Image: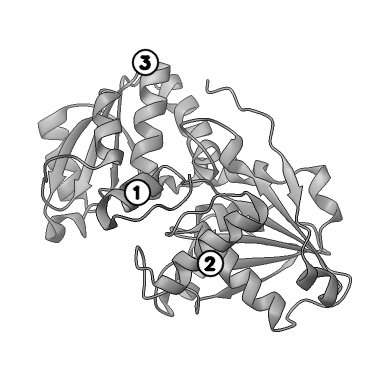
Amino acid sequence: MLIPNQIETQELDFPLLKEKGIRLSIKRLDQIHPLASGNKFFKLKYNLIEAKRLEKSVLLTFGGAYSNHIFAVAAAAKKLGFSAIGVIRGEEHHPLNPTLSFAQSCGMHLHYMDRVDYRRKNDEEIIQKLEKEFGDFYLIPEGGTNELAIKGTKEILDESSLCFSHIATTIGTGGTFAGLLDSIAPHQKLLGISALKGDFIFNEISNLLLKFNINPTGDYKIFNQFHFGGYGKTSQELIDFIRWFYHQFLIPLEQVYTGKMMFGIWELIREGYFPKGSHLLAIHTGGLQGIAGYNQKFGTALPL
């Protein structure tokens, strides 16, 4: 199995926090593994165990061209002796960006799928076509979210997390949010900062909780106003915040998930959302590999 590094929980020191009478700490999941980092480590953990149990030799999964999930699956497959197939949304482009170049260097076969078919990637017809082309494989869904992923993300919080009044995470496919919600204590409130545009995320999370029979003992709230235009979208304001945050705390954030999460948390703090005496834990879900591709594409120099 993948061996985790020790995770640091880092408390931030800043005048705004003292002014508002609250504490803010960050759980650095980006440090858990050099390649399969962040929440991906937990999402993949039990899927990889199951693939081994079923004696599958090939992993197949889906993702975009800059996908953290594709990067992590490729790295894990190489480390554990699996073959890997990454079904990539859209057309092939050369030269490959840093994410896909790394995945290919790990031995992952990149299979490109047009966007019309990709939207139907969960349909039985599409899966059968892939089975006909590639033979038997262990299927990991896009983003890694399934029952085994949620089993893994439940392990992000432990007894040391009980001192926090609020837990915050970003939301993409919802697997990390669901796992955390299944593990928070009754006195805690889970905050989800959606990286996606639209109100549909509320139904997505409700359906996820129903599907996996998650009945949280604590409270939760989803914020969908910090998406900066939608998944993968950004703005100069967000980029400036990411740079400012690194300058202040020496903690790198990326522009798709963690940057938006911390921007949202910071705005909520400024607005007085958290009662005095609150102690907030923000989950750094990793994904820093995507910074290289962003810098290459836009000629920026976000800190790694």
Q: Is residue 199 left or right of residue 270?
A: left
As helix, strand or loop, the secondary structure at mark 3 comes to loop
Residue indicated by mark 1: 142
Q: How far separated are the C-alphas under marks 1 and 2?
A: 29 Å
Residue 210 seen: no
Marks 1/3 in contact by CB < 8 Å: the verdict is no
Residue indicated by mark 3: 81
State the residue in front, 286 or 47: 286
Which label belongs to residue 158? Answer: none
**Which quadrant holds residue 198?**
bottom left
Residue 250 seen: yes
Q: How far separated are the C-alphas under marks 3 and 2?
A: 40 Å
In the rendered image of this protein, does residue 146 appear above or below residue 78? below
Q: Is residue 110 left or right of residue 164?
A: left
Q: How far separated are the C-alphas under marks 1 and 3?
A: 21 Å
Residue indicated by mark 2: 241
**Which quadrant holds residue 116?**
bottom left
Query: Which is more N-terminal, label 2 or label 3?
Result: 3
For label 3, the crowd category at 10 Å Cα-Cα, with few meaning under 14, some 14 to 19 and many 20 or more, is few
Q: Residue at x 56, y 64 (%)?
A: 261
Query: Which is more N-terminal, label 2 or label 1?
Result: 1
For label 1, the crowd category at 10 Å Cα-Cα, with few meaning under 14, some 14 to 19 and many 20 or more, is many
Q: Residue 64 location, x and y as percent?
A: 27, 51
Q: Residue 12 location, x and y as percent?
A: 75, 56
Callout 3 amino acid:
Gly
As helix, strand or loop, the secondary structure at mark 2 comes to helix
